[in-house]
Image: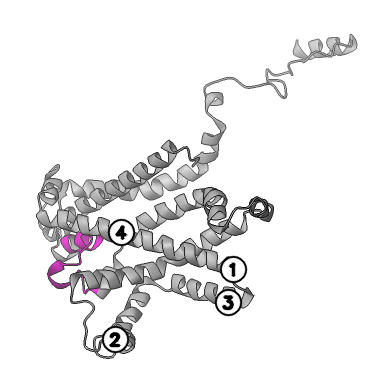
Amino acid sequence: MPATTVTARADHGDSSPVRPAGGAPAPGRRRTGPLSRIPVPLWLLLPAALVLIPLFGYPLYQLGLLSVLKFGQPQASGGVPTEFVGLSNYTDVLGDAQFWTVLGQTLAFAAFCVLATLAVGATCAVLLTRVGRWPRLMLMFGALGAWAAPAMTGSTVWMFLLDTNSGLVNEVLGTQGHNWMYDKWSAFAMVAVVVVWHSFPFVMITLYAGIQAIPDSVLEAARLDGAGTVTVFRKIMLPMLRPLLVIVVIQSIIWDFKVFTQIYVMTGGGGIAGQNLVLNVYAYQKAFVAENYSLGAAIGVLMTLILLGVTAVYIRSLRRSGEEL
């Protein structure tokens, strides 16, 4: 009997590990089995996966399902049955010349906004480390105010500033009567200003926190070795800030590629004859203005694939350069 065996070994002073009664493994003994082969990090990701997979997976499933159906206003009202059409919606979208024009505009607009946001945010982050307490507080409060403003509110306020007859911008520049939203490129430029105004505080705060986390002893040692400001930034600060830069770049790509409110409000739904359309506004017009919800869903799926592709290429290029992510 197991209990007898334990008592007998204790009486003889045997200190070797003893299997407890009931067949349970001894404390500290490594378990074996299929579950024990799963790495610990995967177990740690399990709670987040249980929340995120339903939260993001189900809407994506519905989006993909709608994109392979014929679903417009007649089907939504129940008068006509829904019909499975396969990849017909994708064929229609990819065969539309306007889609490729809008895609090119979207990529160029997003690239410009990402670079401008990084430049403004990084400059302000460095400025925060060089100014005194009160200027730093004023700059941070001003930037956080822009960040906290809803996109609709910020776009509307900027439309007042850019008003053709009574706008502050025309008053300051002496260009009364100039319509900034009439020309395609000036309209894109003004919308880009508002997008950067909304986005740069996130980059500024993130990089400022990263700069503050760099030990002063490291920077002082570099300066004692004769390194100038540019060398310290390029050789010391930039490598240490690179993980943060990866985060803000990916975040900015996603934000700026999906811009909707600023374009829709400031250009009146895409500009004159749709000259300022980006993919998000284009999908909205196809889905809700033209009442072709399946076509809008197909554009949404293509946007998701493009974003995943751009992010994957960026991360792969970083891994090839030896960066840890």
Q: Please report the residue visible at 39 percent of the width from the left and 46 percent of the height from the top.
A: 54
Q: CA distance from mark 1 to mark 2?
A: 33 Å
Q: CA distance from mark 2 to mark 4?
A: 27 Å
Q: CA distance from mark 4 to mark 3?
A: 31 Å
> Which mark is first along the chain, 4 or 2?
4
- Which of labels 4 and 3 is toward the front? 3
Locate residue 108, reporting x and y percent: 26, 58
Residues under numbered marks 1 and 2 in contact, where contact means CB atoms less than 8 Å apart: no
Q: Which mark is residue 110?
A: 4
> Which mark is first along the chain, 2 or 1?
1
Q: Which residues are magenta?
A: 267-286
**Amino acid at pointer 2:** Asn
What element does badge 4 sit on? helix
Is 81 in front, or is 26?
26
Locate residue 34, reporting x and y percent: 52, 22
Q: Is residue 5 above or below residue 213?
A: above
Q: Please report the residue visible at 22 percent of the width from the left and 59 percent of the height from the top.
A: 105
- Which of labels 2 and 4 is toward the front? 2
Side of 72 where 238 appears, left or right: right
Side of 158 where 130 appears, left or right: right
Q: CA distance from mark 2 to mark 3?
A: 29 Å
- Res 29 → quadrant: top right
What element does badge 1 sit on? helix
Is residue 198 among what the camera can see? yes
- Report the residue marked by disc 3: 135
| Other residues around mark 3 within 10 Å, as few (<14) / some (14–19) / many (≥20) | few
What element does badge 2 sit on? helix
Side of 207 where 187 appears, left or right: left
Q: Which mark is residue 170?
A: 2
| Other residues around mark 4 within 10 Å, as few (<14) / some (14–19) / many (≥20) | many
What element does badge 3 sit on? helix
